[in-house]
Amino acid sequence: MEFPYRNILAVGMARSGIATVKMLSSMGGIKITVNDRKKKSEFGNELAELEGLDLDWQLGEDPLKLIEGKDMVVFSSGVPDKSEFVVKAKAMGIPAINELELGFMVSKARFIAITGTNGKTTTTTLTSEIFRNAGLNSWPLGNIGVPVTTQAYRAGPKDIIVAEVAPFQLVSTICFRPHVSAILNITEDHLDWFGTMENYIAGKSLIFRNQTPEDFCVLNMDDPIICGLAPEVKAKVLYFSRKNEVENGAFIRNGYIIWRHKGAEKRVCSVEDIRIPGAHNLENALAASAIAAVMGIQVAIIRHTLMTFPGVEHRIEFVREYKGVSYFNDSKGTNPDATIKAVEAMKNPTVLILGGYDKHLDFTPVFENETFKRLIVSIVTLGQTAQQIMDTAEKAGYKRIKRAQSFAEAVQTASEIAKPGQNVLLSPACASWDMFKDFEERGRLFKILVNGLEG
């Protein structure tokens, strides 16, 4: 069916907004009004990709004044669905959707959607890599940092988009229906956005809202919150588990990943052969195996990918060893549970860099974790949450903590504390927005600072 919307307001010119405008322009015959709260002079070179396109530029204007006469409003992933202009557009009967929904609407590709508090990026990238190794065109897109609209329109019916989706994207979808959905885990996060855990969980569950019995939903059997969602799922449910055998899905038996479906079993690979380290990455490997296997990918291809996949940038990424100290970049660790998983992946005593943007989260679980108590020799904290972390540490009886006034000071201080044979781990348990554009910028600077330590 031809895309029926011809006069579109695009709001928010971050990554997903720019990708949206480029895609709509390539489709032809669409009048596109470009809007952002910032004026053009505030962007620098960020809008260079849109130069030369036939666009109605309305930067720095209130989007409320631009809705009249439009037949669709598309907004960036970071724009709240309760924004006044979104509410007004819907009241006027104008579809108001985010970039994820638009990409799904225009694409012929098959969609896989993966959500969870932690592990989304690794599992999304790993799953897409399995499909690529099977000879398919596949892209890891979405909240991973590459918008769905970069490939959605050009992808064909045999292609596969593996989309990392966040609940703040899902709450703004209407028809989004992946053929396979997966929920990896649910722990406290984004309470600054959702207010309560109940709202956050409800946002996650929207991933399977439009699925039917022709589709599949992959759930973590070891997560009681996720198991509680299973009765709501209309798709065929598959499970993955590190602790128990499952009737249909992926699990561990005698040190091997086993894929079981409709009574038939296949051994995927040894747990020891999985290249990416940590118990949390074993869960990611189980989820990716279940998704790929139910899509018909041969076990031999899944096995090869698990044995060769090196992991993703900014997620427990080894940077270098300097003067006997190993440095790890886990800038993607933006909540306490992610940091706990990173700490549990460490083998040696570790100095932890902690702190950043305040998402209204509780850091107590970090200090209560048994691996943390055993391995973390000192903490360097910084950012908006520095004082909260120090107060939490004091209540937990943890005293080996220093406060840094800048990111560079935090890295330098951690390097001075760490002794040969130990690690320095950046895993902030916080978002980066108090000091950086995103976690990637934070991670890149960490690597620059670490690689420049001898200077």
Image (spheres, helix red, strand yellow):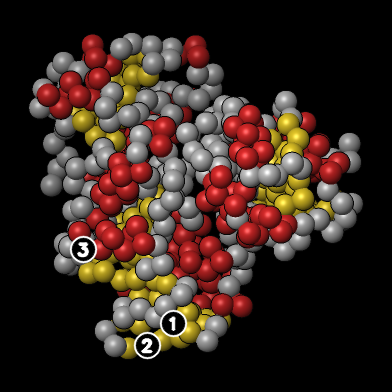
As drawn, 327 above or below 94: below
Q: Residue furthest left?
A: 93
Q: Amino acid at mark 2?
A: Glu
Q: Mark 3 = which residue?
A: 231
Q: Nearer the viewer, residue 426 or 447?
A: 426
Q: How many callouts does the rendering have?
A: 3
Q: Is residue 291 visible?
A: no
Q: Is the residue 85 above or below the residue 19 in the image?
A: above
**Mark 3 belongs to which amino acid?**
Pro
- Position of the C terminus, as image quadrant, is top right
> Residue at the spot x=50%, y=14% of the render?
42
Q: Return the disc, 2 or 1, that comes first in the chain's sequence.
A: 1
Residue 381 seen in the figure:
yes
Which residue is more in the foreground, 14 or 50?
A: 14
Q: Is residue 362 above or below residue 437?
A: below
Q: Nearer the viewer, mark 1 or mark 3?
A: 3
The residue drawn where x is 62% and y is 48% is: 367
Query: Is mark 2 in CB contact (under 8 Å) with mark 1?
Result: yes
Mark 1 Cα within 10 Å, few/some/many (few <14, many 20+)? many
Determine crowd level at label 3: few under 14, some 14-19, many 20+ residues with C-alpha closer than 10 A.
few
Q: What is the spatial separation of the Cα atoms under label 2 and label 1, in whole angstroms?
A: 7 Å
Q: Who's the residue at 11% across and 22% down the image?
A: 92
Q: In the figure, 383 relative to 327: above or below?
A: above
Residue 265: mark: 2
Where does residue 209 sit, x and y in percent of width and height?
Answer: 20, 52
Q: Are marks 2 and 3 in contact (CB under 8 Å)?
A: no
* Residue to which mark 1 is pinned: 258
